[in-house]
Amino acid sequence: MNYADLQNEIKMALKAQDKTKLSILRQWHGEIKNIEVDERREITDQDVDAMCRRMIKQTRETLEGSIKAANDVQRTEMLTRQVGILENYLPKQVEGEELVSLIDKVLAETGATNKKEMGAVMAALNAATGGNLDKRAAAVELGKRLS
């Protein structure tokens, strides 16, 4: 997602009077603005996606704490909905057969043959996908291939 699309989504949530969606989108927008102001640079699509991932992680942690503490049901439902809303804006992750073929390609390019080189291969995979890969599945697959 790009920054302009996020701003349009906020406008649509305002028109639809979807308070939960509007709240989480405004929070996301604010976090991005903070990066823009603090680092004095233009925001990239990767920044927008990275902030979305960070917010999903934070919201999930808050949700887990809310569930463990048996806090009110409304808050738990709201947090669950917020995670779902944010997940809809993430680009599709590379997984399955597509991930396996990409791993084969990167292994051929890097010439990696042992687990000591796994970090370099993961970095190359991350760069090739723009961070849109299931890192856990990639690590498992790499573990099988590198000895």
Image (tube, rainbow, N blue to C red):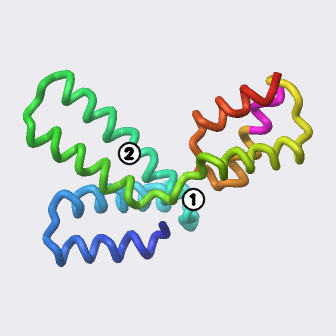
Counting residues from the start of the chain, the first of labels 2 and 1 encountered is 1
Between residues 91 and 24, which one lies in front from this camera angle?
Answer: 91
**Residue 19 occupies which quadrant of the picture?**
bottom left
Q: Tell me where the magenta segment starts and ends, as one range.
A: 116-121
Residue for badge 1: 46
Q: Position of residue 52 (x, y in %)?
A: 43, 53
Q: Is residue 76 above or below residue 4?
A: above
Residue for badge 2: 56
Between residues 126 and 109, which one lies in front from this camera angle?
Answer: 109
Q: Position of residue 26 (x, y in %)?
A: 29, 61
Q: Position of residue 4 (x, y in %)?
A: 44, 75
From mark 2 to mark 1, how far is it between C-alphas? 15 Å
Image position of 11 (left or right of 3): left
Between residues 92 and 100, which one lies in front from this camera angle?
Answer: 100
Residue that appears at 27% across and 76% down: 11
Q: Are marks 2 and 1 in contact (CB under 8 Å)?
A: no
Residue 72's disc number = none
Q: Residues within 10 Å of mark 2 (few under 14, many from 20)?
A: some
Q: Is residue 49 above or below residue 124?
A: below
Q: Residues within 10 Å of mark 1 (few under 14, many from 20)?
A: some
Residue that appears at 64% across and 55% down: 130
Q: Position of residue 27 (x, y in %)?
A: 30, 56
Residue that appears at 71% across and 51% down: 127
Q: Main secondary structure of the magenta part?
A: helix
Q: Quadrant location of the C terminus?
A: top right
Q: Secondary structure at mark 2?
A: helix
Q: Secondary structure at mark 1?
A: helix
Q: Is residue 147 magenta?
A: no
